[in-house]
Image: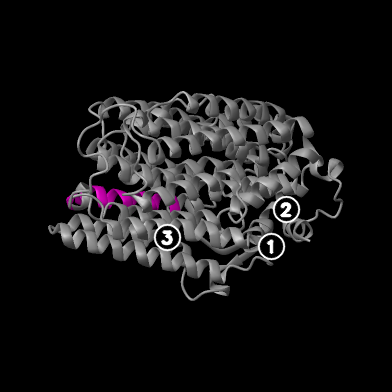
């Protein structure tokens, strides 16, 4: 283990911040379930979410983007098991995204019917804790265990708050896909650990040990595909996407924000475990992943155009976006990988905003069918602004973080894959954005094509979200997208901290890149602006 690349938490802060960050929502969840007052449960939930969010902001301030390696590292051993956590440029922004969307999800449910459901509030807090634990885990089996525990809040929220009568069937479908993915990932991790044991006589699943072992795995290709397919289900990458449109259509939008973060858990797993631990095999089979990603980009966009249910439309748009992100990760150039991570964060925030806006629409109209909607802009300005800003953010509009993310992705793709792939990426992204803007026109501008009922365009009832809460969510998400988009250098500096080391170990980036000194993406942004 390379100790020089590790900075212990005691060298930076006065308490183990990463463990505390995970424990706060867990403790709050227990407190919520222990109280008998719905009002008190909601207050406790907000306090826990706000404290966790503020602590994640503090985490970002103490993180040193100029210091290579894992920071704020914690490692404990008990009963023969190892618990280790840490952050670097690969995961710290995912931590912040989780705390932001968990808080906004609670704000969204503030005056909804779920406000008196202690189990639902506790599930959101538990979901947040599980995602935080998974994002900071530096042990493969520890990461797997958090992913396994994720099934609990997913099942509870779908059964109790889903908008369909077929909730049990939806839960069965989710369990079928997630469990198969978990089993493949478990098999891959076990094979990694035991292959090291054969050479060193030590069984370990610690990420640092796995990365520094330099063991030639006899079944490296099999391990790669087990992990790839397992993570692909979570992303979801074509053709492992079948569960997402169903869950989007029949699940609960009340937990949409935090659920969308869990989709990025698969992207993060590729960044953390797949590419660094099996770099040679990952580069060997990169063409296969890029081929699936390209198919997914156009498949998702074209299927989205065919949808009249706005939930399914967004689900297929997410599948298309996943293809963009995956191409960047498997490009193995600094620009491509940095663009992929930047887009993962930006798309996570933007698609959460779109789905929350669709949830507000559903509460007013009780329908998810686009032909029954229309003319909602005048009476629902907050929802319209949130939808259109987030839709434009997925396009790479100047002033949003995805603008630089798309440019980095295209630049890396041109270097590594050629112009044809880059043009295909641009065309696929335009298709995805076109369908979202088309949905905006049909929902907010055009007249309804079908008779829906007297409650369309009527001011919402008191049981529905108040305008104040809607504007809070709109200002928060749009403000984050615009402010970070105006200056993405802090994001890119953080991501560079780990991406440079990841890509430098691959022959693709070192032999084909025209930048032998591994030009960082921040330098690219400066030169582009000039």
Q: Which residues are magenta?
A: 116-132
Residue 176 at x, y percent in the picture: 39, 26
- Please say if 145 is above or below 3: above
Q: Is residue 7 left or right of residue 378?
A: right
Write the residue at 37% across / 67% down.
51
One can see residue 185 in this view:
no
The reply to whether dot 2 and dot 1 touch (C-beta < 8 Å) is yes
Distance from the alpha carbon under mark 2 to that under mark 3: 36 Å
Is residue 119 part of the magenta span, yes or no?
A: yes
Q: Is residue 460 left or right of residue 396?
A: left
Residue 207 at x, y percent in the picture: 59, 49
The reply to whether dot 2 and dot 3 touch (C-beta < 8 Å) is no
Write the residue at 37% across / 52% down.
381
The crowding category of the residue bearing disc 2, from other C-alpha atoms within 10 Å (few below 14, some 14 to 19, many at least 20), is some
Which callout, 1 or 3, points at the residue further toward the start of the chain?
Answer: 1
Label drawn at residue 475: 3
Q: Nearer the viewer, residue 522 or 234?
A: 522
The reply to whether dot 1 and dot 3 touch (C-beta < 8 Å) is no
Label drawn at residue 501: 2
Which callout, 2 or 1, points at the residue further toward the start of the chain?
Answer: 1
Is residue 8 part of the magenta span, yes or no?
A: no
Write the residue at 53% across / 28% down.
300
The crowding category of the residue bearing disc 3, from other C-alpha atoms within 10 Å (few below 14, some 14 to 19, many at least 20), is some
Q: Nearer the viewer, mark 1 or mark 3?
A: 3
Q: Nearer the viewer, residue 82 or 513?
A: 513
Residue 49 falls in which quadrant of the image? bottom left
Q: Which residue is mark 1?
A: 68
């Amino acid at each position: 283990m390379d100790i020089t690349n590790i900075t212990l938490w005691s060298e930076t802060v006065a308490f183990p911040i990463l463990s505390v960050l995970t424990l706060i929502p867990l403790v709050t969840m227990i407190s919520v379930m222990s109280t008998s007052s719905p009002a008190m449960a909601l207050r406790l939930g907000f306090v826990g979410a706000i404290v966790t969010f503020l602590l994640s902001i503090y985490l970002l301030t103490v993180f040193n983007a100029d210091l290579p390696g894992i920071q704020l590292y914690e490692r404990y051993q008990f009963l023969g098991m190892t618990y280790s956590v840490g952050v670097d440029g690969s995961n710290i922004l995912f931590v912040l995204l989780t705390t932001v969307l968990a808080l906004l999800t609670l704000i969204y449910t503030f005056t909804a019917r779920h406000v008196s459901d202690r189990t639902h509030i506790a599930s959101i807090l538990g979901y947040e804790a599980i995602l935080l634990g998974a994002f900071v885990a530096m042990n493969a089996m520890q990461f797997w265990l958090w992913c396994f525990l994720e099934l609990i809040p997913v099942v509870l929220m779908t059964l109790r708050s889903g908008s369909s009568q077929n909730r049990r069937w939806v839960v069965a479908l989710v369990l079928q896909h997630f469990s198969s993915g978990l089993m493949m990932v478990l098999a891959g991790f076990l094979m990694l650990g035991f292959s090291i044991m054969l050479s060193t006589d030590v069984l370990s699943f610690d990420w640092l040990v796995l990365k520094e072992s330099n063991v030639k795995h006899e079944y490296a290709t099999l391990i790669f595909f087990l992990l790839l397919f397992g993570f692909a289900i979570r992303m979801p990458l074509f053709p492992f996407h079948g569960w997402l449109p169903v869950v989007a259509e029949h699940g609960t939008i009340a937990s949409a924000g935090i659920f969308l973060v869990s989709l990025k858990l698969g992207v993060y797993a590729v960044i953390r475990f797949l590419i660094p631990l099996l770099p040679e095999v990952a580069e060997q089979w990169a063409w296969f992943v890029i081929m699936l990603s390209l198919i997914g980009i156009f498949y998702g966009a074209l299927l989205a155009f065919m949808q009249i249910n706005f939930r399914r439309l967004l689900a297929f748009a997410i599948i298309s976006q996943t293809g963009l992100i995956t191409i960047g990760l498997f490009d193995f150039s600094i620009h491509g990988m940095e663009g992929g991570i930047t887009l993962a964060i930006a798309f996570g925030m933007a698609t959460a905003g779109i789905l929350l806006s669709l949830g507000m629409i559903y509460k007013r109209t009780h329908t998810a069918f686009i032909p029954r909607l229309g003319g909602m802009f005048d009476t629902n300005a907050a929802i319209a602004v949130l939808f259109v800003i987030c839709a434009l953010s997925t396009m790479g509009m100047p002033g949003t973080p995805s603008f630089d993310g798309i440019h980095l992705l295209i630049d890396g793709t041109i270097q590594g894959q050629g112009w044809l792939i880059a043009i295909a990426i641009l065309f696929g992204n335009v298709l995805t954005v076109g369908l979202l803007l088309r949905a905006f026109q049909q929902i907010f501008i055009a007249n309804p094509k079908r008779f829906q009922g007297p409650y369309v365009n009527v001011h919402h009832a008191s049981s529905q979200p108040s305008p104040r809460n809607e504007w809070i969510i709109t200002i928060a998400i749009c403000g984050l997208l615009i402010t970070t988009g105006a200056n993405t250098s802090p994001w890119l500096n953080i991501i560079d901290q780990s991406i440079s080391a990841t890509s430098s170990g691959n022959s693709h980036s070192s032999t084909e890149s025209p930048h032998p000194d591994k030009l960082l993406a921040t330098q690219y942004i400066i030169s582009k602006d000039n």
